[in-house]
Image (cartoon, helix red, strand yellow):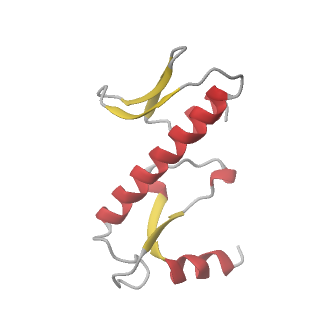
């Protein structure tokens, strides 16, 4: 992942990179996630992938908590997964507002529907 793609996916987070680490901060300067960089040429790309996944996980948990830890389609308490309301490929990001907490079966049904 490139720094530009990271910024597009996580507009509410700023990124600071040194030769030893990459750290993601919220606007109030609280640390969201951090990754140590190893000494190879692909380390920044891998570090940004890891940071992006960690932020998605945190935002998915926030979306589930906002939904009361229930499937947003059925209202049942089930194991949840994060569903992007507008796909990342269509230009949206991993913000909590773009995530829905769905049960595994509901999530599978969402992806079976044709646009």
- Residue 109, above or below 25: below
For image coordinates 68% across by 23% down, the residue present is 40
For image coordinates 35% across by 28% down, the residue present is 27
Could you say where residue 19 lies in the image, as x and y percent from the top left?
55, 14
Would you identify the image quadrant in which residue 30 lies? top left
- Residue 113, above or below 19: below
- Residue 61, above or below 71: above
Would you identify the image quadrant in which residue 12 lies? top left
Question: Between residues 4 and 50, which one lies in front from this camera angle?
Answer: 50
Image quarter hosting the N terminus: top right
Image quarter hosting the C terminus: bottom right
Could you say where residue 37 lies in the image, as x and y percent from the top left?
55, 25
Question: Between residues 8 and 2, which one lies in front from this camera angle?
Answer: 2
- In the visual, does 5 lie left or right of 99? right
Question: Between residues 41 and 114, which one lies in front from this camera angle?
Answer: 41
Could you say where residue 53 lies in the image, as x and y percent from the top left?
53, 47
- In the visual, does 105 lie left or right of 34? right
For image coordinates 34% across by 76% down, the residue present is 70
Would you identify the image quadrant in which residue 66 lies? bottom left
Outermost residue toward the top in this view = 19
- Residue 84, above or below 32: below
Question: Between residues 8 and 25, which one lies in front from this camera angle?
Answer: 25
Q: How many marks?
A: 0
Could you say where residue 34 lies in the image, as x and y percent from the top left?
43, 32
């Amino acid at each position: 992942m490139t720094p530009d793609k990271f910024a597009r996916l996580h507009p509410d987070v700023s990124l600071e990179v040194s030769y030893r680490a990459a750290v993601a901060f919220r606007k109030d300067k609280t640390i969201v996630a951090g990754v140590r960089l190893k000494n190879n040429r692909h380390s920044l790309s891998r570090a940004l992938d890891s940071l992006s996944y960690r932020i998605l996980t945190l935002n998915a948990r926030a979306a589930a908590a906002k939904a009361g830890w229930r499937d947003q389609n059925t209202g049942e308490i089930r194991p949840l997964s994060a569903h992007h309301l507008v796909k990342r490929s269509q230009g949206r990001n991993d913000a909590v507002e773009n995530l829905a907490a769905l049960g595994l079966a509901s999530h599978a049904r969402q992806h079976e529907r044709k646009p």
